[in-house]
Image: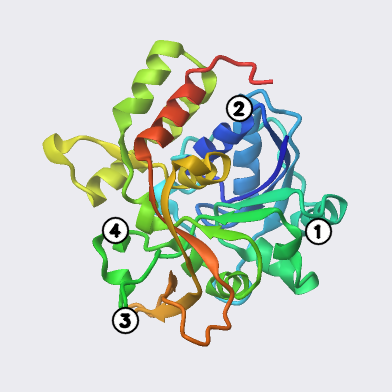
Amino acid sequence: MRKVVVDTDTGVDDALALMLLAADPEVEILAVISVFGNCTGERAADNARYVLDTCGRTDVPVYRGSDVPIRQELRLNPGIHGEDGFGNTGLRPQTSVAAEPDGVAVLLELVAAHEGEIDYLAIGPQTNLARALEIEPALLEKLRSTTIVGTLGPALYRDTAPWADRRFRVSRDPNVTFDIDAAEAVAGSVGNVTWCGPYVTRQALVPEDFFLEIAQTTGHEPAALITKISADYAGFYTRSYPQPGDERVMGINDSMAVAALLRPDLVTASVQRPLQTFEDPETGDRYLAGVHPARDEHRPLHTVVVDMNFDGVLDMIGETLRRPLPWR
């Protein structure tokens, strides 16, 4: 049984990622910890609770994590996921998640109790991890693995402007830019860390009809929830990445990281790289990208995913959403 802690700014693609974990009989979700990003940290916690309750997983605890970045000004993603992170649907759980206990304290307690056994999945800004690292600098070495949705991916050799790639021109890796100080703290730490960022996730834009068909033919609650909260989300992706015939598409960014964690066979290419910060002179935004190691490299080497079996990921999603409840 794989022990997993999920760190999420629960928006639309986060909801789908949570479903994949909640449905896997070989996964024990020890905790879900919220972070700001797609919406406020408070709303992200409530959204996670709503998703898990919809999936019949009332047994999974949700905790409030970080509501603000370590140092920089708070930024959110209302234009993509809606003010509430759920496409402005107003969906809320019956009981909101309490402010205490603090999710970072819970994380440290869990790591102490299960050292070397926890797979940590960070699908929002890395603020909770950075705060935990301030208390326990060896945190990443005490985790079995850390999988993060973030970084631009591997920069081209001697590339000085990796953000210019078309795949990054929309949103441009908000999980890193919304708290670059936290991301840099994680990037500078030793551990079994895998980054699965927009370089690979933006290659998989899924037709909205994929989800609509599953919801309509099965009537299953999780599939219905995804279609309900994703209308505006699909509109954003369709405007940003126009398709032939005006087909509506949507991103499944966070599900890529779940697939990389649970199904490493679906990762078809990855590289070991140190991570370096780059700054866009036009916007001032800072990004992380994997760079070629120097001859005397002293920075930690992390895994950067560069390609995946996208059909395999879609099969994984489709099989999950077609499965009737209860999942446990």
Q: Residue at x 72, y 56 (%)?
A: 143
Q: Mark 2 to mark 3: distance in Å? A: 43 Å
Residue of label 3: 158
Q: Mark 2 to mark 4: distance in Å? A: 30 Å
Q: Residue furthest bottom?
A: 296
- The amino acid marked with disc number 2 is Ala
Q: Quadrant of the N terminus?
A: top right
Of pointers 2 and 3, the one earlier in the residue sequence:
2
Under circle 3, the secondary element is loop
Q: Residue furthest front?
A: 295
Q: Position of residue 13 (x, y in %)?
A: 47, 42
Q: Residue at x 51, y 74 (%)?
A: 274
Q: Nearer the viewer, residue 55 or 185?
A: 185
Of pointers 1 and 3, the one earlier in the residue sequence:
1
Q: Residue at x 66, y 26 (%)?
A: 25
- The amino acid marked with disc number 1 is Leu
Residue count near mark 3 (Cα–Cα under 10 Å), binned few <14, some 14–19, many ≥20: few
Q: Residue at x 47, y 69 (%)?
A: 177
Specify the label residue 108 is tagged with. 1
- The amino acid marked with disc number 4 is Arg
Of pointers 2 and 4, the one earlier in the residue sequence:
2
Residue of label 4: 167
